[in-house]
Image (cartoon, coloured by chain):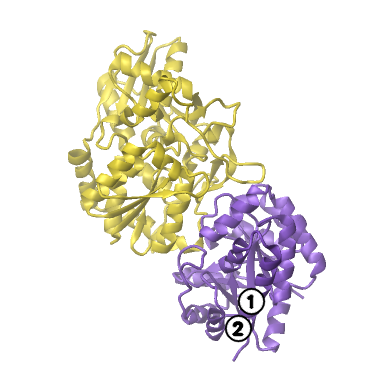
Chain colours: A yellow, B purple
Amino acid sequence: MSKHLPTKFGEYGGMYVPELLIPALDQLEQAFMDAQQDESFQQEFIGLLKDYAGRPTPLTKTRNLVSNPKVTLYLKREDLLHGGAHKTNQVLGQALLTKRMGKTEVIAETGAGQHGVATALACALLGLKARIYMGAKDVERQAPNVFRMRLMGAEVIPVNAGSGTLKDAVNEALRDWSASYDKAHYLLGTAAGPHPFPTIVREFHRMIGEETKQQILEKEGRLPDAVVACVGGGSNAIGMFADFIDEPSVQLIGVEPAGKGLHTHEHGAAIAKGTKGILHGAYSYIMQTQDGQIEESYSVSAGLDYPAVGPQHAYLHDIGRATYESVTDEEALNAFQLLARKEGIIPALESSHALAHALNMADGAEEQMLIVVNLSGRGDKDLTHVHQILNGETQRG
Amino acid sequence: MDRYQAMFERLRESGQGAFVPFVMIGDPSLEDSLEIIEALITGGADALELGIPFSDPIADGPTIQKAAIRALDNQVRPRDCFALLTRVRDRHPDIPIGLLLYSNLVLSPGIDKFYRQAAKAGVDSILVADVPIRESAPFRQAARDHGMHQILIAPPNASEQTMASIGEFSSGYTYLLGRAGVTGTETAASMPAGELIDRLKAVGAAPPILGFGISKPEQVKSAIQAGAAGAIAGSATVKIIEQHLHDKPMMLTRLAEFVAGMKSATVYS
């Protein structure tokens, strides 16, 4: 057996799963390490990203959004990627790994349905059989994405257990995997979960930051002062941060969902308000009761509605390399509308959180400031929901 | 003497294997749990495996998930579970008692404090379902510090390296998985487990007790014949509780009958 990858980020991460899943995780780690060294794998991955998914995505300078003349704000346009969000990047990578391991089936979880849609499209393309667990409540809330997944041949399995949302879908996917690991790969959708998922997901998203760096140097001749990304589990943020971690002049800012406010119980800010613990195989910041029972998170944006955060974010927070802020539903909804009106771009509600925080930074800036926001997804999936909220037809969420 | 060791010696002398039922503490209520445990012991349970309810039990199938939900809906907390364990221990000084639970419940008060509380309540062993051997060092240390056993799982797909670690670190007993997947009687244990049992014996592991998918006396019998030191039935036991939620006398009768039937199959033939 060759060398292993580090399983932890400081004290965070690890492999807190039943013994039964350890061989499957070891097999995945080995396949990933081999693939990273394998020229033909890399060529196939890069080829799919370019010719199928549409990479590189543009870096767009906003024209009208920011009123403070000292501030220049760019958007990394992951919303233009096939599938409508950054999710497609790493799903293509893991789908190729699935084939490399000789597995024919894919299990996935999804909250809003974006990871499910990305999984469904990659499996359709690569001839894999996909079954996607989705909380029963989310199946109702996200009907168009359920239809998209089914249209592309995936089986969508509603999960009634627990709260019927993302965390329960992850539980059910892990349960499935513990019986099916011989044939099936668990294609986890964010930079959380047991090792090696946080590392694999980061590496398969790191082109977001690499492209951004190259593009901003071409356009501005310098690195940005800050890169800003929303954080649920934290996949788009870690993809944006990865190539900037060793650039100390660049502030890394993650934005968690404050929901109805951090003073309420209805939020999903695991770093701001959570405590250390284990959920879904990783030690990190999680939302829990004083006894260690996992609490339910809340956000207007289903993609950020998760009661934990990826372990590398917990580590970057603790060592002070990245800063984690939070934005309420209301601020995110304002940013959502503002970007539509000022720039003609409808962002995902998830990405609207990052944008809202960048706009707060811009308002307060007294010196020259160059900011890049990772516009991780487009807002088509949110239109009905936002329409209802703006018409006052629904309580948020 | 160590309670597991005493049990295995007593059983060996009388030509029997162990039957170990599992139930969730606080399912459906704490008071009921006390009576349920009495029924299990009356039926002939050699040892007890008891769960503390957790919100996200990833190694459990629907039956045990529902048991946890029933207990959590009744606001059952870990400290209530320890209080109940203390009462069981007072009544039954000799029966081995194992806890089966998830890591975040242990981490919440801190590993050392949790193990101290468990030891004080008379617990003999702790199995943390989502702590594999490679993450188990601090848990094993705490178990040693407080005079308990950390129970390790031997899965059917165990690598040589895992087997070697089980040989080195297992104590009390080894929880032998009869099959892949999660707990539940929907899929029966795949028999015989003989090959895995031989591998465990070769590495000098603690006595193997077979669990996962065990619901019938015939399965207990073939586990014992294959060389297991006993069998555990969780979901099958919990299912009896679930089926008689509104008729407690019947629930207790059926539980005692079930355990007696399973226990009778542990006699070497």
Q: To which chain does the residue with label 2 belong?
A: B
Q: Secondary structure at mark 1?
A: strand
Question: Residue A269 location, x and y as percent?
Answer: 53, 32
Q: Quadrant of residue A301?
A: top left
Tell me which label, 1 or 2, sits earlier in the chain.
1
Q: Which residue is mark 2?
A: B265
The three-letter code of the residue at mark 2 reads: Ala
Residues under labels 1 and 2: Cα distance?
Answer: 9 Å
Q: At 67% across and 86% down in the image, what residue appears?
A: B12
Q: Nearer the viewer, residue A10 or B148?
A: B148
Quarter occupied by residue A112: top left
* Residues marked 1 and 2 touching at CB (< 8 Å): yes
**Which quadrant of the rendered structure holds the N terminus of chain B?**
bottom right
Report if residue A372 is visible in the image: yes
Where is residue A258 shown, x and y percent of the image?
Answer: 52, 27
Query: Is residue B107 visible in the rendered structure shown here?
Result: no
Compared to residue B75, the image places residue B120 above or below, namely below
Q: What amino acid does circle 1 point to? A: Phe
Task: Count the labels in the image.
Answer: 2
Q: Residue at x 60, y 70 (%)?
A: B170
Task: For label 1, count other residues whose C-alpha is less than 10 Å away and answer few (under 14), some (14-19) or many (20+).
Answer: many
Above/below status of A126 relative to A276: below
Q: Is residue B265 left or right of residue B155?
A: right
Label 1 chain ID: B
In the image, residue A276 sits, relative to residue A178, either above or below, namely above
Q: Is residue A370 left or right of residue B118?
A: left
Q: Which residue is mark 1?
A: B19
